[in-house]
Image: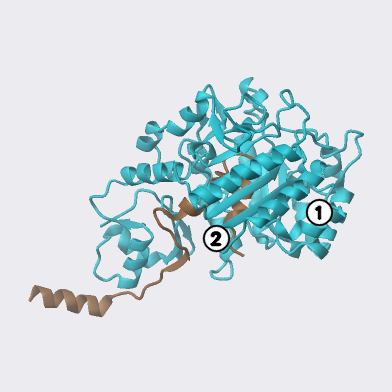
Chain colours: A brown, B cyan
């Protein structure tokens, strides 16, 4: 009985997904990226360039 | 299930941007759906597609997961990754300009040039790493001084590095130059082998020519613009404009961005990067750098990024600043004499290693190991921004402590996320003003 009520509730008021994934992530995603950190003036632009999606 | 402690949330009218600092995922969700998840991450009225997207991107994580352990494991793997190699190579410590604010240390410079023999040793070092470790991604920064002053060796290096490219090995070359000498036929012949060229311009002519000058005092704006026009005809890859900003040129940088559009140079420019005028390592040690990296300066630079985004320029993920490349065993800088440093900021200081005549790398200074072995336990326990900073910059640090970015992130990360999303995904979402 409880199960059926929960199901009914979900069916009645469930929301359509609004998620848009702009950039996928993974816990290890940046392991394949260059090691430039972007912390200082030297490698910040390079890091940015390497990451840019064209 | 719970929301990751390393999520940053930014409201964007009726939407919320979620950025996860461990996975680096960037997601947009409606405010209504987000509010339900925030109250109850297991709510049954949320669509399975939403759960799947949030779970896959580590925005939702297992309730019992200790994310600090995940982060530590992640960083350790990253530090010792042998599949990626990132190197700055200095072709000469000399520069043909005498910029008013140069932050590359001059006192230890030897004014030397990379010789052909030494380039061959560096190349054998890289080639061996590619072969022995099955490298997938090699990023080389062609650096100086002004690297185009050593034009023949630079061209040889680009040609040699290009020969290492295969379908499995990506060789990414970036040239950091002041842009005054790229009108060279030999360079133009091979220039498309370089993936990215970064050229620094500090504003429109009247301001740029006060700051970025030859030793005679003559300004360089006109020659750089002419060379950009030459690149427009000859170069098909990325051009990044770097602006070094301080109080003197904030307004002029905005004018420069408008100027590029008027002069039809906008299409050539892949991205814009705006940074502080940094202090030299000498001045950092003398405690003379704080005024240059002021909070007021941070606000102004953010305003410039926002302006660039509004004008249609793409910007990089400049809000993800780490970990410091010195922490990675396969990230370092090499000078003309084959000395090795954990970061290009330390060039010409006491070397941390060298490359021998056989192309083998030998570490001789304990600082190399100290930086790599460092674990910022205090940051791990006290700072939610640790995955994108990991203690901060070693070069800008003082007394052996890296420069902490926590206050900066607290004040600016949300705004930078908005600017970034507007600049790079403006067509996907409704644009909003920050103010």
Nearest to N terminus: mark 2 or mark 1: 1
**Residue B203's spot in the image, x, y percent?**
79, 47
Nearer the viewer's eye, disc 2 or disc 1? 1
Classify the position of the C terminus of chain A by image quarter: bottom right
**Residue B347's spot in the image, x, y percent?**
65, 31
Name the foreground residue: B75 vs B4.
Answer: B75
**Residue B228's spot in the image, x, y percent?**
82, 56
Mark 2, other Cα within 10 Å: few <14 / some 14–19 / many ≥20: many
Number of numbered discs: 2
SS at badge 1: helix
The residue that label 2 is drawn on is B421
Q: Residue at x 37, y 37 (%)?
A: B380
Q: Which mark is residue B313?
A: none
Q: Are marks 2 and 1 in contact (CB under 8 Å)?
A: no
The residue sitting at the front extreme is B358
Q: Is residue B127 left or right of residue B184?
A: left
Q: Residue at x 71, y 24 (%)?
A: B108
B86 to B347, vertically: above or below: below
Give how far apart the Cα atoms at labels 2 and 1 are.
36 Å
**Residue B324's spot in the image, x, y percent?**
52, 39
Q: Does the rendering let one see residue B206? A: yes
Image mark 2: chain: B
The residue sitting at the top extreme is B286
Q: Which mark is residue B187?
A: 1
Name the foreground residue: B252 vs B325.
Answer: B325
Q: Is residue B182 left or right of residue B409?
A: right
């Amino acid at each position: 009985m409880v199960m059926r009520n929960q199901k009914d509730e979900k069916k009645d008021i469930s929301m359509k997904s609004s998620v848009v994934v702009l950039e996928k992530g993974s816990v290890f995603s940046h392991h394949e990226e260059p090691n430039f950190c972007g912390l200082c003036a030297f490698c910040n632009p390079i890091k940015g360039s390497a990451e840019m999606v064209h | 299930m719970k929301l990751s402690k390393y999520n940053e949330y930014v409201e964007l009218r009726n939407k919320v941007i979620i950025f996860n600092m461990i996975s680096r995922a960037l997601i947009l969700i409606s405010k209504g759906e987000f509010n339900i998840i925030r109250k109850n991450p297991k709510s049954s009225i949320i669509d399975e597609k939403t759960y799947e997207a949030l779970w896959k991107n580590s925005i939702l994580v297992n309730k019992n997961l200790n994310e600090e352990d995940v982060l530590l494991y992640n960083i350790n793997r990253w530090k010792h990754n042998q599949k990626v190699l990132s190197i700055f190579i200095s072709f000469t410590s000399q520069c043909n300009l005498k910029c008013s604010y140069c932050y590359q240390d001059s006192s230890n410079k030897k004014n030397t040039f990379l010789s052909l023999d030494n380039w061959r040793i560096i190349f054998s070092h890289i080639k061996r790493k590619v072969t022995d470790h099955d490298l997938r991604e090699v990023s080389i920064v062609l650096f100086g001084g002004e690297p185009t002053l050593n034009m023949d060796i630079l061209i040889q290096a680009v040609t040699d590095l290009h020969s290492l490219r295969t379908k499995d090995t990506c060789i990414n070359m970036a040239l950091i130059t002041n842009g005054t000498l790229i009108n060279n036929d030999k360079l133009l012949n091979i220039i498309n082998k370089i993936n990215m060229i970064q050229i620094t311009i500090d504003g429109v002519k009247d301001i740029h020519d006060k700051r970025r000058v030859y030793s005679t005092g003559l300004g360089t704006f006109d020659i750089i613009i002419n060379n950009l026009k030459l690149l427009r005809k000859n170069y098909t890859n990325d051009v990044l404009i770097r602006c070094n900003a301080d109080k003197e040129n904030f307004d002029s940088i905005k004018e420069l961005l408008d100027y590029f559009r008027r002069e039809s140079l906008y299409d050539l420019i892949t991205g814009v990067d705006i940074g502080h005028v940094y202090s030299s390592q000498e001045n950092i040690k003398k405690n003379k750098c704080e005024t240059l990296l002021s909070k007021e300066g941070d606000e102004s630079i953010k305003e410039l990024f926002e302006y660039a985004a509004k004008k249609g320029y793409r910007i990089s993920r400049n809000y993800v600043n780490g970990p410091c490349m010195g922490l990675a065993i396969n990230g370092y800088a090499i000078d003309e004499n084959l000395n090795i440093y954990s970061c290009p900021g330390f060039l010409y200081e006491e070397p941390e290693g060298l490359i021998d005549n056989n192309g083998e790398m030998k570490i001789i200074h304990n600082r190399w190991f100290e930086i790599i072995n460092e674990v910022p336990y205090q940051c791990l326990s006290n700072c939610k921004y640790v995955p994108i900073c990991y203690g901060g910059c070693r070069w800008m640090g003082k007394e052996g402590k890296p420069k902490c970015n926590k206050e900066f992130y607290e004040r600016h990360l949300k705004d930078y996320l908005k600017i970034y999303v507007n600049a790079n995904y403006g067509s996907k979402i409704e644009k909003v003003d920050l103010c």
